[in-house]
Amino acid sequence: MDLTLISLLLLLLHLLFGGSLVSVQHTEGCNIDESLALLQFKESLQIQSFASVSPPVAPKTASWKLHIEREGKTANCCCSWDGVECDPKTGRVVGLDLESSFLYGSINSSTSLFNLVYLQRLNLAGNNFNLSEIPARIAQFSRLTYLNLRNSNFSGKLPSSLSNLTQLSFLSLAGNYNLDVVTLSWVGKLTKLTTLDFDFTNLRCQIPYSIANLTHLSSLHLSGNQLTGSFPYWLMNLTQLSQLHLSGNYLQGNIGSSISGFKHLKQLDLAGNRFSGTVELKSFLKLTNLTLLQLSKNNFSVLLPKPNPNVTLPKFEILGLGSCQLKEFPHILHNQSELFWLDLNNNNIHGLVPEWLWNGTKESLQYLDLDNNFLTGFEPSSVSYPWSALRVVRLSSNMLQGPIVIPSPSVEIFLASHNNLSGKITHALFNLSSLSALDLSYNNLSGSIPLCLGNATDSLSYLKLRQNNLHGRLPLMFTKESRLKMLDLGQNKFEGQLPRSLENCTMLTHIDVSSNQIYDSYPFWLGNLPYLKVLILRSNRFHGIIKRDSEMDYNFTSLQIIDFSHNHFNGEIPSNYFQSLESIISVDTQRLTYMEEAKYLSIEICGWVGRLHYSFTLTNKGTQREYEKIQTFLTTIDLSSNRFEGQIPSSIGHLQGLYSLNLSNNVLNGTIPPSLGNISMIESLDLSHNRLSGGIPLQLAELSFLSSLDVSYNNLSGPVPKGPQFNTFGIRSFDGNWGLCEMPFLRKCDSSEISPKTAEVEDSVFGFGWRVVLVGYSFGFAIAIWLGLGFTPWKHMRKFTG
């Protein structure tokens, strides 16, 4: 039913019931005006499954159907609909709860939602309102006590009229990253607030003193923003305050002993700021009601108190002391029987994990992060961990020795890379039925992988065993129910063929089997994987020709990273191969997100969500490096060091989003196709060590982002083009081409080698000036920064980097 039909229905009902729709109610007092307003609101939006953060089984609006008989004898209207609450006496709609109801579209001031003038509670959280602004008419809901717009994809400035909602006790706009919030001073007018949640709302200001007016406030969440200034000690005057979350901001200065003045705090999260100096943990222990304490990732050192059996310690549920310069396990962890989240990442703790840590948390601990310490093992040594409820284990970048200690069956994420683990990967590890992510890369493990992955076959999403001493054939058992998304087995000694059962892993986005001894032909059948973005076959014994299968449904339409270098491929590079690479033909450079799915390997514990990033090794501009986080727009094709012959296909010029192209060390002949000048985004081009002849196309001089060029050791001749970028390349870019001339380091061209047209084009290109050079360099520099750096959002976006 569209909006026009609803309007006609409204008019029809108006005529049928004598012009007064307000009087038409069913036996429970349901108001027809409001029912139609809700239907019109529903029809103004789309129902899309992708629009909800945590969608229910079915959208609540599915039950919204209007049926009325004359004289009001029977009615099915809004008071019986899911998510709608009516006043039992008046029949007016007083509550609307559409959280995670698949709603997609824009909301504006003309929406019929604002006809519900008696509304007291409004929950639209977890939907997608398509970057529309929060309408100013929201102030019309003067009776609102509860407003929840969390994670709903609103944008723009907040309407000043929000300050008129003086009856509010609960206000949440958290997770709307595209809001533009430059002040919260107006919040001081909402004196009845008990909960204020502005986590991840792009808030850019100091914490306003006007919050001190909110004497009923019990929960204040301002994490993941750009708050500046020092710690707001004046908040301790709010005697009802029990939750204070300020993590992931730019707050700085010292945190002194006066923190103990917050006597009623149950949750205190200061992680990921710039606090400095020395902090005595005993000041926090005076807050005996604390269940959550997060101090990780600041610039201070935490002094641990001496053990004192006469002191009553808080019963922690969440404790984060990462990056606090600890040298030992805190004694306050004794007898913490309710602790389920422990973060001691990036400290200076040496030796064994003590047995007493196990005893108190054996049944409660779900999340354990001991990454980046100097741990060598567990006390006493065991083949398995004792924690029965453990879901996440992070032990990477330590000095763990000996065989792998098998986690409990409840474990979903097990990360132990960059250690000295040895021995074999036992079948017991792959029998963990809940295991989603396993990273044992950069160890000394040997032996083979069980050919059958056991109970983990259907649950495993992330498998990284890079750089060990593993050998044998690759696992063959990947079922059609497989959830595998990321497979990295690089830098081992695997042999045989690439298992054809990978074709069943339809969710795969990343395959890296580089630097092994795999002997196989081109795996064209992987082209049927619709989401495959990364395919790295480098340094193996793949052989034969590369072909595109016309019967494949996808043919690598999502592929962005292609590395077939250092193999034995031969024949011509097929020109039609590049026609299906849709993700490289056009790339949105404005979306500076990282290569991860929106819900990729997410795990939620007490509202904290963790995600694993992709990472892999690439050769870029002659240097091999591991990228921990890859921008979604990074695209590269590396076919170097094979035996490809024939001409470079001109169809490569269609790949306008290509960032790096390497065809070096082959036996390619013919000329450099001028169509390469159409690859406007390219920064690195390597055609060296081939048998290319003819001149360098003048079109290449127009590539304003090109910062690395190598055409050395070919049979090229004629003048090197002049242009903003070409003028920055040294002699090594052109070495070994005895027919080339001009530029400062080559021979002077004969008059017969420079045509009037050539000179004219070169002058035109050069006329762009050094501004283009600077644009090219700045873009390249920006990409270098984006590729080398990442950010770690805090609450609700916590990263588990593998």
Image: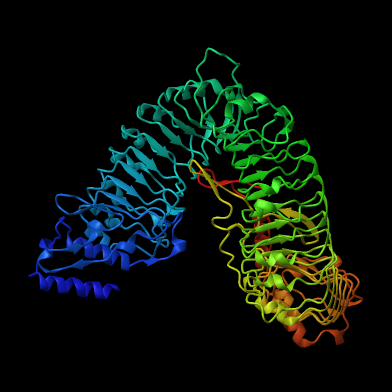
Residue 150, horizontal then vertical, whole percent: 40, 50
Asked whether 478 or 653 is in front, the reply is: 478
- Residue 20 visible in image: yes
- For residue 323, what is the image quadrant? top right
Instruction: Please give left or right for residue 238 compared with residue 511 in the image.
Output: left
Q: Give the number of marks.
A: 0
Which residue is found at the position 68% from the left and 82% from the top? 550
Residue 572, horizontal then vertical, whole percent: 81, 80
Asked whether 640 or 127 is in front, the reply is: 127
Instruction: Please give left or right for residue 769 compared with residue 490 in the image.
Output: left
- For residue 558, what is the image quadrant? bottom right
Asked whether 443 or 747 is in front, the reply is: 443
- Residue 773 visible in image: no
478 in relation to 673, above or below? above
Residue 127, horizontal then vertical, whole percent: 41, 57
Residue that protrudes farthest toward the left in the picture = 18
